[in-house]
Amino acid sequence: MKYIVTAAALATLCELAQATVYLAGDSTMARNGANDGVTDGWGPYLESYLTGTTVVNKAIGGRSARSYTNEGRFAEIATLVQANDIVVIEFGHNDGGSPNSASDNGRSDCPGTGDEVCTSGKDGSTVYTFARYVSDAAESYIAKGASVVISSQTPNNLWEGGVYSDSAPRFVEYARLVTGDIGENAYYIDHFQAVAEMYEKLGNAETNALYPKDHTHTSPEGANLSANAFAQAVRSAEGNPLAEFVRTDIPLVY
């Protein structure tokens, strides 16, 4: 039996093969700045679980959805992204707190899940919600023909103190809600839950060994496992465009 590939189908396949995956996030996604081999983010390890695409890691340590916006980093990605590219957005670790304080750190988002607005107690600037910062960025990429994967933050050490607890911070739910509000071409991945299930499977001693410095930043081994868990979650997510690029032979870690 002979199969005929039309020009349109070939063009679509070429576009998929040329797609770039951009990562926007904080230190848990970024390459460790000191490169000391002690801790690392999961972003640099993602490409080994994908095929047919290039990963461009734009994650920066210490950032929140607010500070990433105000520094023009979301906007920078918008100048690079093209049709059929995929942007993964994952924040939450640095987004908590209140911007109303005189000691506002420039990272805390306005509390709420929609159009709530706050005023910085430090400089009087307008502060928006996590949802507003993420949706504005996502919609700018979607307008250029890209897809957006909004990922919930990685968990802190869920076995800290020797007792397992998978209580999720509010930004995990915020990420899910904003994905639904954006709608078409926005896809949610619960990275928190995927890693939480992996940690439960690993157990107390093995999980604690992945946190050599604090309860947030993992060793390179832990970062690689977090990337693996993310890829596994993507592969099982129906309709997610990034799933097309996940290798079929990745280990199942949860």
Image (tube, helix red, strand yellow):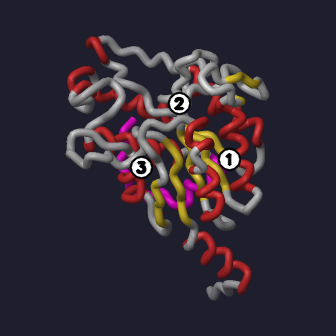
Task: Report the Cα–Cα distance between label 3 and label 2.
Answer: 15 Å
**x, y percentage for residue 140?**
72, 53
**x, y percentage for residue 39?**
27, 39
**Residue 239 is one of the magenta-drawn residues:** yes
Give the numbered dot on residue 92.
Answer: 2
Task: Report the Cα–Cα distance between label 3 and label 1.
Answer: 19 Å
Considering the numbered disc 1 on the image, is that residue within a helix, a strand or a loop?
Answer: helix
Is any atom of residue 21 visible in this view?
yes
Q: Amino acid at mark 2?
A: Gly
Considering the numbered disc 2 on the image, is that residue within a helix, a strand or a loop?
Answer: loop
Name the foreground residue: 142 vs 189. 142
Vertical comparison of 78 with 95: above or below: below
Q: Is the C-beta separation of discs 3 and 1 under 8 Å?
A: no
Give the numbered dot on residue 187.
Answer: none
Please give the name of the residue rendered at 74% of the width and 36% of the height, measured from the top-left corner.
180
Residue occupied by mark 3 = 43
Considering the numbered disc 3 on the image, is that residue within a helix, a strand or a loop?
Answer: helix
Sequence-first tag of 3 and 1: 3
**Residue 178 is one of the magenta-drawn residues:** no
Residue occupied by mark 1 = 137
Q: Left or right of 213: which side holds 132? A: right
Please give the name of the residue rendered at 25% of the width and 25% of the height, measured from the top-left corner.
208
Vertical comparison of 140 with 100: above or below: below
Neighbour class for label 2 at 10 Å: few (<14), some, many (≥20)?
A: many
Highlighted magenta segment, given as a residue range: 238-254
Look at the image and tell me in which quarter the N terminus lies: bottom right
